[in-house]
Structure formats: structure tokens, C-alpha cells
Amino acid sequence: MANEAVLLKQYSIPTSHIVADGTGIEKGTILAISGSNIVIAPWDGQTACGVPVIGIAAVEKIASDGCTLLATHKDGEFKGTASGSIGVGDPIGILSGSTWPNLISSMKNATIASGSSILGISLEDASTTETFRFKLQPQAAGYAGT
């Protein structure tokens, strides 16, 4: 997968979330929450963009393998790929309507649309397509720090 988030520093053990058996999700995919404790890769078919970000897949989920649980990182430090300019300390996230899997944007001066989420905080400066270090800290849209 292109642009997967890579774990650099683990703060806690991953938690389990429900996932559809027929769904395939690669390790390092930024995940969204849909329904009651159900995680999805929000760019599958580009139909679920803008749902709340919940974490990052800790392991690969193979489609139709009989497994309906997926380990999910909720915190830690990761390397990710920038979509646009990002500054140190910027709140970061996936803008509502994004069609590129796992590309992370600065939310500092963004008009945060309903459905967008804060993924965490940038720990490095980055330009478009550069990788950068960030702290995973999911927050709902409208987070006061943005």
C-alpha cells in the first residue's frame, strides 16, 4: 500500500475493533469508525470519505479470512505522508472528501467540514508527498485546538 503510516513509538497496546469479514485492510491504514465499534478503511471505493478517524491498523486484515476483529493503534508516534504543507505542532487530519488513501493534511487553517477529524499533531515540518513524524491523537471534528 502506498502512504501507509509506519509505527515509530508505541505508547500502549492496540485495541480491538469489529471489521467486516470480507474487508481487506493493510497494516498502517488510517481507519475510520462506522457504526457501533466497526472500523473501515474510509477510502475503499471512495464512498466513505469524511467519517471520523479512529486510529491506524496495527496488523493486516485479509479479506474473507474469517476474522472479524482488527487491532487498532489509538496513540503512538508514526511516520506519515503529507498532502500539502504541514508545520511542527499543526493539528493534522484527513480532510473531508479526500480521495487519496492515507495522505495527511494540516488542519491549522482549514475550514473543518462536518465529518472531518483530527488525526493528531505534527512533530515535523513537511511538504507535499514528504514523510513526517506525527503523534496519533484522534479527535472529533470541531476540536477546540484547531
Image (tube, rainbow, N blue to C red):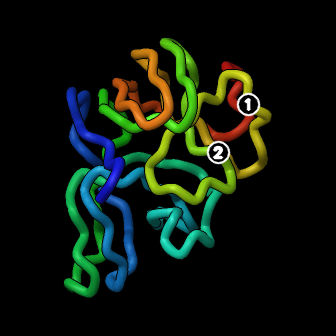
Answer with mark 2 or mark 1, whichever residue precedes in sequence. 2
As drawn, the label of residue 68 is none
Near mark 2 (Cα within 10 A), the count class, few <14, some 14-19 or many ≥20, is many
Quadrant containing the C terminus in the rendered view: top right
**SS under mark 2:** loop
- 129 sits to left or right of 22: right
Q: Position of residue 27 (x, y in %)?
A: 25, 56
Which residue shows up at 51% across the image and 64% down it? 43
Question: Nearest the camera: 81 or 47?
Answer: 81
Instruction: Name the residue tied to disc 2.
Output: 95
Disc 2 to disc 1: CB gap under 8 Å: yes
Q: Is residue 138 above or below residue 18?
A: above
Which residue shows up at 65% across the image and 29% down it? 107
Question: Nearest the camera: 70 or 1?
Answer: 1
Q: Position of residue 138 (x, y in %)?
A: 50, 37
- Where is residue 49, by image quadrant? bottom right
- Where is residue 70, by image quadrant? bottom left
Which residue shows up at 29% across the image and 59% down it? 1
Instruction: Name the residue tied to disc 1.
Output: 110
- 45 sits to left or right of 39: right
Near mark 1 (Cα within 10 A), the count class, few <14, some 14-19 or many ≥20, is few
Amino acid at circle 1:
Ala
